[in-house]
Structure formats: C-alpha cells, structure tokens
Amino acid sequence: MPALLEIEDIHTYFSTNEGIVKAVNGISLSLHENRVLGVVGESGSGKTMTALSILQLVPFPGDVVKGKITYDGQDLLNMPVSQLRRIRGKEISLIFQDAGAALNPVISVGKQVEELMLEHTDMSKRQARAFAAELLSQMGIPDANEMLDRYPFQLSGGMAQRVLLAIGVALKPRILIADEPTSNLDVTLQAEILHRLRRLREENGTAIMLITHDLGVIAQMAEMVAVMYGGSIVEYADTLTLYRRHMHPYTWGLFQALPRIDSPDQSLKPLPGAPPIMLDPPDQCPFLHRCLKATAECRTSPRPKLLEVEEGHLLACYNPMELEQPG
C-alpha cells in the first residue's frame, strides 16, 4: 500500500548571525493510512521541526532547504499557499505541544473552534457554534456551551489540551500530527487523550504521527517507531522489534534510563552529557560525544547512514549494541 505521506531527505535549517542551525538534517519517513508512527527523542532532537516542516510552518528564519514531502501524490513544499491552507486543518491536522501557547488568548474558545468550521465547510455561524459545543462535549468537557464563551487563560492545562485536541480532530483529518499531546498532564488525562486518538484512528482510518519523549506512550499507540537524535533518525523499526532488540547506543540509553516496575530498587541510569548544539554540527555521528561504544572509526568517519540490519529494522551506527540485547 503506498504511503499517504512521504518525507524524503528533509533538511530544515535556521540562518543566524552565529551560523547555520541544522535543526533537521536529512530525515526520511513514510506514514500510511490507519497506522500510528511514533517519533521519539529528547528535546532538541528535531521532532517538532520535522512536524512543522510538513505543513510549511517553520518559523522565521528557518526554512526547508532540501528534500521532498509528498501527501497523497501532492508536493507540499512547492504547493501554492492558497492550496496548502485548504489542506491544513482539514486533511492534515497538527496538535501543538503547548496548548496554552497554541490557543489565541484574546479569542474565546468557541470562536477558535468555529473559525475552523467556517473556513473549511459551508456551515453557518449558528451551525458552527452548535457543532463546536457538541465537539467539546465529545472531548469530555463538561458544560460545553458555557465553555465556548471562555478564554484560554481561564482553562486548566488539561482543559486547554482537550480544546486543542477538539480543534485537531474536528474535520476528521486523514493525517493527524500530535506533538507531545500528553505532556504535562496527569495519568488520568493522558489515558483519556490517548483513548480519543485511538477512536479517531479506528472510526476514520486516520494516520497518526505521534511525537513524544515517553516510551510508554509509544508502546501503547504505535506500530512503527523512529528514534531521532541530533536532527536525524538513528534507529527505525516496528515497535516490538525496537523494544526487544534496540541496537543503537542512544536507544539503549533511553531504555536504561526508564524506571522498571519489576526492579523497584534498581537505580536509574541517565544518559551522560547533553544533546548536541545543532549550530554547524560536525560531520561525524551526532551521538559521538555521549556514546559509550564510540570507536576510532566513529571519530574519523562521516555521519553513518541509516541502513537495514534486519528486515524492517534500520540503524545508523558503526558499532551497535548486540542484536539480542535484552529490552
């Protein structure tokens, strides 16, 4: 089955007075209908910039300088803005990471939901308002009609996240990009948000790109996982393979840093060092200076390519962990 969304060798750079920030440095991904692709990595790995690149929403002075993004056979990067606006929100929807920042603080919740319906459907204002109330109610928001007249600053973090989710799913998009949709929420709200995403997929066949740093969320939701580090993908596999046989030292480090319910007395093993600064990064592996398995080859060779090490399992590493390493 052909991919609904195809990302090919995308490079998103920011030109600054200090130099070129290579936020996304050669990403290739595909997303299929009725599938969930998890994208995991630390802050600064390029996850959000990859999402913004898809819909040409990269903030100034950033730009997609190389690569191709195809949606249902259409070239998104060379598409006229007027045509792209018809796709944004309707066919491809993006749930931003920070609900408080994503919602306009001086426009009521109701008008922000209604605006989407008036832009992309032939609903009247009255119909759009009724639809907005019903949608908020479906998101588990009590007193939905009253909520329409409130402003984002009057909402709790959980309520704001539900409103943002309502806007994201309102038009039953073919693709939903969810950037940290459960971040900063308590466990109960996290479970509810994930349940809403599952329903969207089951009822509409929506393809979901789920961006998160939470490996537990990935395990619950995704069929395929891309691990990002330093603006590139370092490992890619189906979820079961990645969790059982992760081979990249960075992926291994992420799993080592997780608390284990079967070993409550075991100390956490945080990754040493910090993510790289992507201002004119070196040509070697981006994980080189934090890697416990770095060799002379790693220090002198160019950035490793993402290559298949077993069927469906791709890796960018010169000296990987053992294939049967327990996960």
Image (cartoon, rainbow, N blue to C red):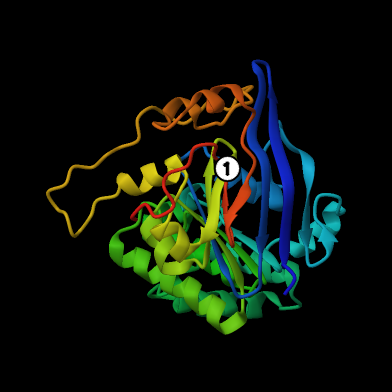
Q: Position of residue 310 (x, y in %)?
A: 56, 58
How dense is the environment of label 1, judged by Cα within 10 Å: few (below 14), some, or many (20 and up)?
Answer: many
Residue projecting furthest to the left: 265
Q: Quadrant of residue 158?
A: bottom left
Q: Quadrant of residue 24?
A: top right
For residue 216, side relative to residue 135 (left or right): left
Residue beneath the point at 48% across and 49% down: 98
Q: Quadrant of the N terminus?
A: bottom right
Residue beneath the point at 72% across and 68% down: 4
Of residues 250 and 107, which is closer to you in this image? Answer: 250
Secondary structure at badge 1 equals loop
For residue 166, side relative to residue 49 (left or right): left
Q: Quadrant of residue 89?
A: bottom right
Of residues 36 and 225, which is closer to you in this image? Answer: 225
Q: Quadrant of the C terminus?
A: bottom left
Say above or below: 92 vs 316: below
Residue beneath the point at 40% across and 68% down: 220
Q: Position of residue 18 (x, y in %)?
A: 64, 15
Amino acid at the residue labelled 1: Ala
Residue beneath the point at 23% across and 55% down: 260
Q: Position of residue 283 (x, y in %)?
A: 64, 25
For residue 68, side relative to residue 235 (left or right): right
